[in-house]
Image: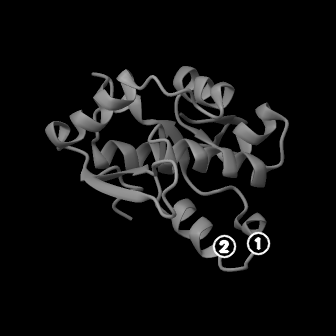
């Protein structure tokens, strides 16, 4: 709920050789606490495993898994795995925590394909330091509620 409302942001990171990754949660208004993580992403010289997908998130902004899957020409389960690689590289996140929680639960033997759309929107965390990023829970709730609702045959955005 707090992630979906825009009040809390999560960032993942897993170093090569680590068995498990780490997740940090931040209040969206805590720019000073987020800054070191965001700066590290901007300075990262390590190549990503998925440059095309990362470029898409950077250029097109937050996107749902189904859209990314369609554009990448891959099944959602494969794109979700790629997005999780970007999460553990510290480059991407989601406005919901459910995809990460469910993917970890799926490692216990359940299929991640049944998680459908992957919930929420995936985004490049580097955009969190842009001036246009203003976490306003009320406005975010309005956008989330209105997104995709038909109005005279067109979506309201």
Write the residue at 51% across / 63% down: 19
- Residue 121, label in figure: none
**Frontmost residue, 152 versus 22:** 22
- For label 1, count other residues whose C-alpha is less than 10 Å away and answer few (under 14), some (14-19) or many (20+): few
**In-image side of 102 versus 114 (left or right):** left
- For label 2, count other residues whose C-alpha is less than 10 Å away and answer few (under 14), some (14-19) or many (20+): some
**In-image side of 112 versus 148 (left or right):** right
Circles 2 and 1 in contact, beta carbons < 8 Å: yes
Q: Earlier in the sequence, mark 2 or mark 1?
A: 2
Report how far apart the C-alphas of labels 2 and 1 lie in the structure.
Answer: 6 Å
On screen, residue 126 above or below 27: above
Write the residue at 72% across / 39% down: 67
- Disc 2: which residue: 106
Q: Can you give x and y, in whole percent of width and height, for residue 23 in the image?
A: 38, 58
- Residue 111, label in figure: 1
Residue 151 in view in this figure: yes
Write the residue at 68% across / 51% down: 81
């Amino acid at each position: 709920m707090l992630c979906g409302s825009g009040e809390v942001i999560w960032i993942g990171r897993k170093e090569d050789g680590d068995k498990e990754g780490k997740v940090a949660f931040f209040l969206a208004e805590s720019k000073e606490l987020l800054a070191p993580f965001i700066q590290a992403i901007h300075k990262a010289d390590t190549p990503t495993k998925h440059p095309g997908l990362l470029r898409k998130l950077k250029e097109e902004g937050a996107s749902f898994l189904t859209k990314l899957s369609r554009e990448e020409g891959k099944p959602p389960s494969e794109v979700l795995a790629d997005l999780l690689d970007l999460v553990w590289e510290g480059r991407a996140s989601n406005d919901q925590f459910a995809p990460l929680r469910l993917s970890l639960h799926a490692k216990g033997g359940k299929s991640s394909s049944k998680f459908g759309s992957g919930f929420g929107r995936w985004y490049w965390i580097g955009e969190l330091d842009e001036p246009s990023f203003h976490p306003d829970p009320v406005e975010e709730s309005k956008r989330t509620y209105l997104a995709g609702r038909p109005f005279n045959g067109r979506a309201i955005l």
